[in-house]
Image: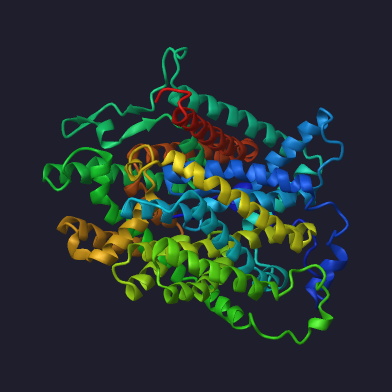
Amino acid sequence: MSQSVSPSPQQLKISPEPPHPAAPSAGTQDPERYWLENVYKGAEHQLTVRAVVAGMLIGAVMCLSNLYVILKTGWSLGVTITACVLSFAAFSALRAVGLVKREVTALENNAVGSVASGAGYMTGGGNMAAVPALLMLTGTLPSAGWLVAWFAVISAMGVFAAIPIKRQLVNIEQLPFPTGTATAETLQALHGNDEGSRGKARYLGLAGLVGAVVAFWRDAKASWLVWNLPSKLSLPFTIGGKPAGAWTLSLDLSLLLIGAGALVSFKTGWSMLVGAILTYGLLAPEMVSRGVIPEVTYKAINGWALWTGASVLVSSGLLSFAFQWRSVAKSFKALSGLFGKNTEEEKDVLADVECPPTWFPLGFLVLGPIVVGLMAYLFQIPWWAGVLALPLSVVMGVIAARVTGETDTTPTKALGPVTQLFYGAILPGNLAANVMSANATGGVGLHSADLLTNLKTGWLLGANPRKQFFGQLFGVLAGAAVVVPAFNLLVPSAEVLGTEEFPAPSSLVWAGVSKMLVNGVTSLHTSARIGAVCGLALGVALVLLERWAPKKAKPFIPSASGLGLSIVIPGASSISFFIGAAIAEVLRRKKAKLAEATVLPVSSGFIAGESLMGIAVAMLKAFGFMPR
């Protein structure tokens, strides 16, 4: 569920060729030597002090935004492209008023993106699925300081896990890493005096302002505010004698959700609309009439529908992952050589540029015991079970990195349940172990894949990979320090989760899997068990149809991830996603140039503006500066 929502290569119109001649010609045998001699720009400013500071600040902002979004939708949003655009705009503004004298370079901005990405993705990899799930299951969490340490160490392990596979995946095989390639093209456009890209920065800023104003007008409480925007408008019909809004079928006055919808495919958008109608317009009313669902509230409906939605998501995720078996096989082949001796080390042309291979085992020797100790102390996971998580996290990191390189999707929603099943078998009944062990492997996998995505950008632009490595670590520290207090502010207790305000669908799925592993399927209501079986079958069927159906039929096959998600979030959220996806699709078909210039920056602006204002209003209320 924590896969990121980022624009597809088609939406960004990425050219099939990389923006830099990072690959040798057909007659050249050594791509790394070619890169060093023709692309590498070691003398250019890169990881400067101002790049680190800007990256940590922008990354912290993106982390806050992603936290708000993932609690609303279950997805983390792309960080690097938005961060680079924000960085460019900020440095340009500072230079215009004389506060900055030297213009920021493309590689310096790339370093900002690496730092910001490490911070902004602190919500992914299962972090903001596992911790809320643990709170729902146990009612308590470790103190803020311990959670900061946990997130920082797990994420840093992911950064180190990327070292031994970087050269194979990025330098030699040159996997596409579409987001990394798109970021490289964006940076080249921004720093090549491309007026179109500069216009995108303006669109992003204006949309962010609009999103913030709408969020404040809707959520803030003050004597001078004559009236607030309503949060939702019920659709104009009744179901079972109750207004559609009671069944969550409303128009949600949230630009964030519309912006997020514009960043997914139209197929995902209409699939979510279909799922919302089926779940909240047909199935839920029927179950209420039969007494299976006790009352007409989102929480009561979700308690029943969760098992169907989770089954669709897990089964489709695992089967899609299984169809990538070639990537998995290649990952294990690469894994077998991680500790092999490099007989050509003395001839390594990139020895002074790449991270030394010894950093990987040294990093795990230092961080591994800390992780095992934290698992034992914070979550009562036996030391031997914690030790097992270390090699498992390396395997997950290698697999996640390759799959991300080939598909641009980090398979957290498939790898997370695999770890949960494994620990459910070796530690039956231990809810904390089941959830937080999956958090460990998921966090390593995400940050490994994230660093390699950034290193792909650097490879295309000629950046120093060691400096990007250190930049990612700076970002990890910033993200861990920000995400925990912000989460505690937004979620003071478990009662906040699973509500219309914060549906937290990914957390509900993780918590549901753990409950089922501990209590067994017999603990579920008969209709919920039937729903779970139907969800498993539906997830499998949709993946198979997507793979083998005739080409003309594929556009009409619902998206498994979109359909599954719509079952576990309020119907109003799915309707907003559909509206955003439909607007973006119409623009792409009717006004392609306008869509290219506006969809990504305006959507990102809506999301950032509303989410950050939402957190600001929550802080004002929490500290007594504004009535609740």
Residue 306 in the image, given as x and y percentages of width and height: 29, 52
Above or below — where is 220 with respect to 203? above
Q: Which residue occupies the extreme left position in the image?
A: 290
- Residue at the spot 65% in from the left edge and 48% down from the top edge: 116
Instruction: Report the number of discs.
Output: 0
Quarter of the figure with the C terminus: top left
Rendering colour mode: rainbow
How far from the left and from the top, in percent, is residue 173? 68, 72
Residue 315 falls left or right of residue 6: left
| Front-lying residue, 194 or 331 | 331
User: Could you tell me if residue 213 is visible in this image?
Assistant: yes
Nearer to us in this view, 61 or 9: 61
Residue at the spot 53% in from the left edge and 24% down from the top edge: 213
Tell me where residue 15 appears, x and y as whole percent.
69, 54
Q: Which of 150/468 is in front?
A: 150
Q: Nearer the viewer, residue 359 or 454?
A: 359
| Residue 179 sits in quarter | bottom right
Q: Where does the N terminus fall, quadrant-wise?
A: bottom left
Residue for point 72% across, 39% down: 197
What residue lies at 59% left-to-right and 68% top-to-bottom?
367
Image vertical order of residue 361 relative to residue 528, above or below: below
Asked which quadrant contains residue 430, the reply is bottom left
Whether residue 556 appears in this view of the structure is no
Say above or below: 242 vs 400: above
Task: Point out residue 446 in the picture as x, y percentages from the top left corner.
Answer: 55, 61
Q: Is residue 101 left or right of residue 451?
A: right
